[in-house]
Amino acid sequence: MYIREFNNFKEMLASVDEDINSIKVVLGELLRRVETLKIKVESEKALRDVLSKIGVSEDQRQVSNVVNLKRVRIYIKPTAEQELTSLESFIEYLSSRMVILESIKKELSLFASAGVEARIEVIYIDGLPREIYIR
């Protein structure tokens, strides 16, 4: 949670645009990683199939590499499938965040286009504008 001040709505909208563009850049990088991981997942599946055919059971191959703490999960030498699942969840989170920011931008653009010139203070929670005070 943090608070930012802007001289007007146009300045705030520029900041929201920067946030949206940053998310787009991160999403592009993550999507490239996902494609690479999908290839690794397929390779790991093929290897598991081969091991299964030669008689190595799933129990012999599987050792837990996850430590669950109260608020965080730690992976020790994560599999491609574990990474892929985590990245896909993160991509979904970022995508929904971007949609929210675009919606906020659309709503606030009415103030900017109306020429409302006032100092504003914005309370951000989890990186999203939640409350705006017009001063």
Image (cartoon, grey):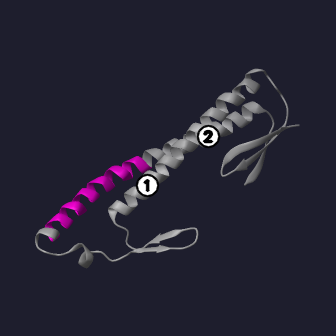
Chief secondary structure of the magenta portion = helix
Location of the N terminus (image quadrant): bottom right
Residue 47 located within the stretch drawn in magenta? yes
Position above or below: 100 against 38? above
**Which is more toward the observer, 70 or 42?**
70
Q: Could you tell me residue 125's position as x and y percent?
A: 70, 51
- Secondary element at tag 2: helix
Relative placement, left or right, of 110 versus 52 is right
- Secondary element at tag 1: helix
**Dividing the picture into quarters, in which one does residue 108 lie?**
top right
Q: Could you tell me residue 96's position as x and y percent?
A: 54, 42
Q: Real-space Cα distance between discs 1 and 2?
A: 22 Å
**Which is more toward the observer, 130 or 26?**
130
Position above or below: 61 against 3? below
- Residue wearing tag 1: 87
The residue stretch that appears in magenta: 30-51
Q: Along the polypeptide, which appears first: circle 1 or circle 2?
A: 2
Q: Residues within 10 Å of mark 2 (few under 14, many from 20)?
A: few
Tag in front: 1 or 2: 1
Q: Residue at x 69, y 29 (%)?
A: 107
